[in-house]
């Protein structure tokens, strides 16, 4: 008799986690150890998986011109998606006005929000962060963007060797299959990680916190739903990609990202599901890891939404001109924060300081940031899945499975 599917196990882990967190209260917060172990297991396999997948994908592309062509298409799509996500967040918060409709006790002046706004976001800092000083340092720190850059050079160089590099390519291809096999073992622990993550969140904050922020949460999740299933659905329709079928294939990584509030956790499963959907393995290996640094649609949408929400809560009105400047500023800084922990909050803090909005306002959203991050992470997975399918379609390498 066939047992429950992976999706059902994840769903059961979510339900049980919420229930245990609700009834155990603060004691359930200790179950966070299950989530921490699962996250560490994922981080253990991600770096070698990304390296091997990209190198094999690039080597199969065959020449630098193909890499450049696909890279340009990918970056153009990512930049377009970033702009649309920022505009969506801006329009949503201006229409719904959550900061004006909610009665929230404003944080006192000097409240510590744990976010530094003095970080250097210059072009030089961004560019130097792209290039790893050491491959092993990048692998040890799970610096995905740096691993991507090294893998691009390595893959192109390997492809240029021709027959001389075939032995090494077969070895790295075998490593790729090995890492996917390890990932399948790690994923068997996923339901327990999901259970621990939700039990800890509900136990720590309590379900009651949702009541005071219900309007804000509803507005934000409504915006994420509109972006993911409306705008990205239209993109797929225009490219003749079956959107519902794509979402069906991605349901497992989406649930993983949502329940753990981590897009990174879903990366190995997303690679596997997109290849099964019909995307070329070389396109998946190139586009998807790059998307985790440059195409986090849910997090980007949150930047304009949260900044304007805090301004509204303080009764500060930003003109149309100021909002456009903020949008353009975030288009640049959102790319420069790739690979930085809590990157969206750091960008928001910088925007608050730039427009003389009290940075203490971050304390309003930090309390429920885990809940909002669940939706952002799930949207990031959908956004990168659509991006990979679109690039595969543009390259004529999308072979839809039956």
Image (tube, rainbow, N blue to C red):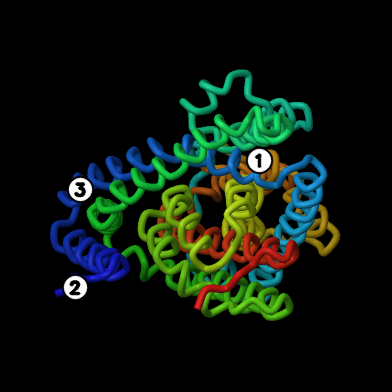
Q: Is residue 279 above or below residue 190?
A: below
In the visual, does 135 lie left or right of 367?
right
Measured Cα–Cα span from mark 1 to mark 2 = 39 Å
Q: Secondary structure at mark 3?
A: helix
Instruction: Classify residue 142 as left or right of residue 45.
Output: right
161 in relation to 347, above or below: above
The residue depicted at 73 percent of the width and 50 percent of the height is 330
**Circle number at residue 31:** 3
Cα separation between marks 3 and 2: 29 Å
Q: Residue at x 49, y 33 (%)?
A: 171
Task: Say if mark 3 contacts mark 2, CB within 8 Å.
Answer: no
Element under label 1? helix
Residue 185: x percent and y percent?
28, 48
Q: Are marks 3 and 1 in contact (CB under 8 Å)?
A: no
- Which residue bears the numbered disc 1? 59
**Badge 2 is on which residue?**
2
Q: Nearer the viewer, mark 3 or mark 2?
A: 2
């Amino acid at each position: 008799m066939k047992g429950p599917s992976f999706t059902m196990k994840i769903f059961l882990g979510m339900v049980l986690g919420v229930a245990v967190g609700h009834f155990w209260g603060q004691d359930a917060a200790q179950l966070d150890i299950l989530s921490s172990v699962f996250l560490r297991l994922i981080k253990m396999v991600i770096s070698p998986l990304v390296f091997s997948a990209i190198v094999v994908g690039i080597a199969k592309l065959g020449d630098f011109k193909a890499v450049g062509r696909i890279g340009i298409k990918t970056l153009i799509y990512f930049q377009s998606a970033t702009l649309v996500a920022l505009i969506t967040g801006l329009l949503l918060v201006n229409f719904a006005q959550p900061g004006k409709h909610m009665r929230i006790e404003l944080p006192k002046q000097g409240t510590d929000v744990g976010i530094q706004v003095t970080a250097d976001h210059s072009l030089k800092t961004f560019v130097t962060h792209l290039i790893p000083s050491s491959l092993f340092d990048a692998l040890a720190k799970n610096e995905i963007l740096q691993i991507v850059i090294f893998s691009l050079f390595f893959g192109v160089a390997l492809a240029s060797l021709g027959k001389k590099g075939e032995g090494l390519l077969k070895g790295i291809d075998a490593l790729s299959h090995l890492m996917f096999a390890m990932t399948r073992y790690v994923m068997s622990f996923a339901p327990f990680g999901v259970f621990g993550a939700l039990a800890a969140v509900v136990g720590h904050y309590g379900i009651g916190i949702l009541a005071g922020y219900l309007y804000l949460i509803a507005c934000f999740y409504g915006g994420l739903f509109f972006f993911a299933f409306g705008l990205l659905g239209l993109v797929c329709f225009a490219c003749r990609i079956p959107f519902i079928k794509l979402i069906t294939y991605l349901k497992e990584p989406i649930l993983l990202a949502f329940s753990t509030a981590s897009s990174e956790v879903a990366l190995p499963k997303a690679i596997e599901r997109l290849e099964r959907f019909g995307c070329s393995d070389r396109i998946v290996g190139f586009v998807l890891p790059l998307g985790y640094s440059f195409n986090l649609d849910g997090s980007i949408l949150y930047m304009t939404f949260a900044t304007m929400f805090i301004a509204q809560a303080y009764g500060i009105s930003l003109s149309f001109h100021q909002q456009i400047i903020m949008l353009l500023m975030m288009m640049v800084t959102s790319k420069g924060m790739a690979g930085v922990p809590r990157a969206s909050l750091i960008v928001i803090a910088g925007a608050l300081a730039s427009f003389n909005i009290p940075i203490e306002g971050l304390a309003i959203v930090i309390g429920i940031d885990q809940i909002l991050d669940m939706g952002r992470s799930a949207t990031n997975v959908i956004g990168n899945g659509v991006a990979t399918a679109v690039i595969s379609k543009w390259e004529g390498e999308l072979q839809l499975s039956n």
